[in-house]
Amino acid sequence: MQVKNMKAKPTIEKTAKDAKVRGWTDGKFDVHRERRVCERFSSNLQARLFYGNLIYTGKVTNISMSGMFICTKVKFPVSAEFLIVVLLDERTAKIPIKVKRTIKQEDDYSSELSGLGVELLKAPRNYLDYVGSRNPI
């Protein structure tokens, strides 16, 4: 009788902490779990988006230390990086961003549900101070 050289499949051991971070609990993925790292705060801030050599307008509807959602009628490509300027209580913050997701409301493109979820590449101090002074959603 010959013994075949069978390679065992590698197993990945996950700790409970790793599982919770990735959304897994009791062997099932929790799709309703909040996956954001930072707490969100509602806002109503005017924004200018500088993409290429054009300037677009938008309204920031929620903010966090690491990202924001910007309502806009313009659809930007995912992973695009550009500069935005946000008006914070009569001060401005220039923030480099990266588009993480886009949402287009099917029936009304001007809806507050249409826009961009963005990651802040380097948030300035005045923006971080502003977010720190807000109340959670």
Image (cartoon, helix red, strand yellow):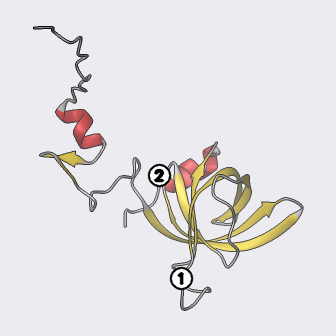
Q: Foreground: 48 or 11?
A: 11
- Circle 1/circle 2 CB separation < 8 Å: no
- Quarter of the image where one finds residue 17: top left
The residue carrying pointer 1 sits among few (fewer than 14), some (14 to 19) or many (20 or more) residues within 10 Å by Cα, namely few
Secondary structure under tag 1 reads: loop
Q: Quadrant of the N terminus?
A: top left
Q: Residue, x 21% and y 26% (percent of image)?
A: 13
* Image coords of residue 6 (percent x, y): 23, 16
Label ID, residue 105: 1
What's the distance in space between the residues labelled 1 and 2, CA to CA? 30 Å
Q: Residue reaching furthest front?
A: 1
Q: Which residue lies furthest to the bottom in this view?
A: 107
Name which residue type carries label 1: Gln
Query: Would you place residue 37 above or below residue 84 in this image?
Result: above
User: Counting residues from the N terminus, which is met first, the one under dot 1 or under dot 2?
Assistant: 1
Q: Can you give x and y, in whole percent of width and height, for residue 119 in the image? A: 57, 51
Horizontally, is 95 left or right of 50 in the view?
A: left
The residue drawn where x is 32% and y is 57% is: 34
Q: Residue 109 at what x, y percent from top left?
A: 61, 85
Q: What residue type is labelled 2?
A: Gly
Instruction: Name the residue rendered at 65%, 45% in the picture.
Output: 124
Residue sitting farthest toward the right: 53
Name the spot of residue 48 as percent of width and height, x first. 75, 67
SS label for mark 2: helix
Residue drawn at x 85%, y 59% as measured from the top left:
52
Would you identify the image quadrant in which residue 46 lies? Answer: bottom right
**For residue 17, side relative to residue 52 (left or right):** left
Compared to 95, does 8 lie above or below? Answer: above
Where's the C terminus, which quadrant? bottom left
Tell me if residue 92 comes above or below residue 115 in the rendering: above
- Please name the residue that numbered disc 2 is placed on: 132
